[in-house]
Amino acid sequence: MNRTPKHPHIFHIALFSGAIATTATLSLFIPGVTNSVRAALQESPKAILDEAWQIVNREYVDATFNQTDWQAARQRLLSRDYSSREQAYDALRKELELLNDPYTRFMDREQYQALSNQTSGELSGVGMRLEINEESKKLVVVEPIEGSPAVKAGIQPGDEILAINGKSTEGIAVEAAAAMIRGEEGTKVDLKLARDGQAPFDVSLVRARIELPTVRYTLNREGSRAIGYIRLNQFSGHASEQMRRAIQELKQQGAEAFVLDLRGNPGGLLNASIDIARMWLDQGDIVKTVNRVGQSENISANNSALTQLPLTVLVDGNSASSSEILTGALQDNGRATVIGSQTFGKALVQSVHSLSDGSGVAVTIAHYYTPNGTDISHKGITPDIQIELSEAQQMQLSSNPKLIGTMNDPQYAKAIDTLMATAFRPNAKPPQRASR
């Protein structure tokens, strides 16, 4: 049985690890089908169905397709008549369910575009985080993103957004407001804002391509020690460069040790997890992948670590996929002490393909193992130091995110205690572990 994440709305959008690929060819070869019939198929939803079927047939990790007749699935898809594209999509989803793999899935245009934006680490908009203020129930700006049109226009944290393109935001959901503000690069959006009791004023913004911050970091002074705290929210296309910048800047600021926070990180791009592992590891294996024919590939560090300073890693039940690859690499190689609760347990790799009508399909293509050969599927990674947050502690941190990564955060506090007790002792050495 597949485990369900604690926050499925977050987890769903970036569950795969692997590179986004584009399918360049479309095969519609069916014995006995004439050129005229084949041309008609290409103008129908059946072309998309066969395109998706071909990708799964070629790449899916289980050559038995969960003991199902995948050729018969193709015949069922192409023998039916569809009154709409949505009806065809539903038929494809039904056939994919036979694989009993929630990570191999079809996405319509909107879903595929959302996933592409999320994993690329970019979107087209004006660059600001929004929320509904608990007291006023107003839509407010939490933070404008550095270098964005919002920053250039002088928008500030706490500004209330009263209207978007002339439409009142009263009673609007955050997701709906964000969707109205996003749009194609170069297009305009008009906002009516209020600030600190001043009279409302209008701001016109031109949407741009914006790099989303997935890494946040700060130098924390804990007693007499300087601790670099890095929180990685997702392994997006810009995560590696943002992590590199965080490590380098914290070192320049005098960091003596690091806390890497992967709690709630659902995963993302496989290459990003490998790149980031190499920033912490000089030597040792990072991950082993095994494909449908049993071919394995071992991916290792390459003597390019940015630091050898002491490291602790924070994880929880929503640390999944690429988060588990990175955590497993650091734990098995004795590079870091892992603290928190059991991770999610996703040991599968997906590739994501765009289809010719703008929709997409994600396909599981490999199984992965930690450097010591551990299969974490449905089990997750067990932290070296397990510490569960109570319901009250979780509520406190979720209602006041500023407490995350401070001594009011019990798991972070344990990471600091661990560093103080081990890393800063005279002649302290990194923890060593035997193979499991």
Image: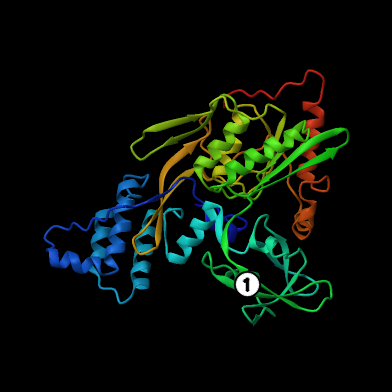
Residue farthest top in this picture: 427
The spot of residue 346 in percent (x, y) is 52, 45
| Left or right side of 361 for 193 | right
Residue placed at 78% from the left, 18% from the top?
Answer: 427
Residue placed at 64% from the left, 62% from the top?
Answer: 149
Q: Is residue 59 above or below residue 13?
A: above
Residue farthest right in this picture: 223
- In the picture, the quarter occupied by the C terminus is top right
Task: Give 211 or 43, whichever is nearer the viewer.
Answer: 211
Residue that numbered label 1 is attached to: 177
Q: What amino acid does circle 1 point to? A: Ala
Task: Give 258 or 433, whichever is nearer the viewer.
Answer: 258
Q: Is residue 415 above or below residue 285?
A: below
Q: Is residue 221 above or below residue 3?
A: above
Residue 131 picture quarter:
bottom right
The spot of residue 339 in percent (x, y) is 71, 38
Q: Is residue 388 above or below residue 77?
A: above
Element marked by disc 1 = helix
Residues packed near mark 1 inside 10 Å, few (<14), some (14 to 19) or many (20 plus): some
Residue placed at 17% from the left, 58% from the top?
Answer: 30
Q: Is residue 16 visible?
A: yes
The spot of residue 338 in percent (x, y) is 68, 36
The spot of residue 236 in percent (x, y) is 55, 48
Residue placed at 76% from the left, 58% from the top?
Answer: 395
Residue 227 picture quarter:
top right
Q: Coloring scheme of the render?
A: rainbow
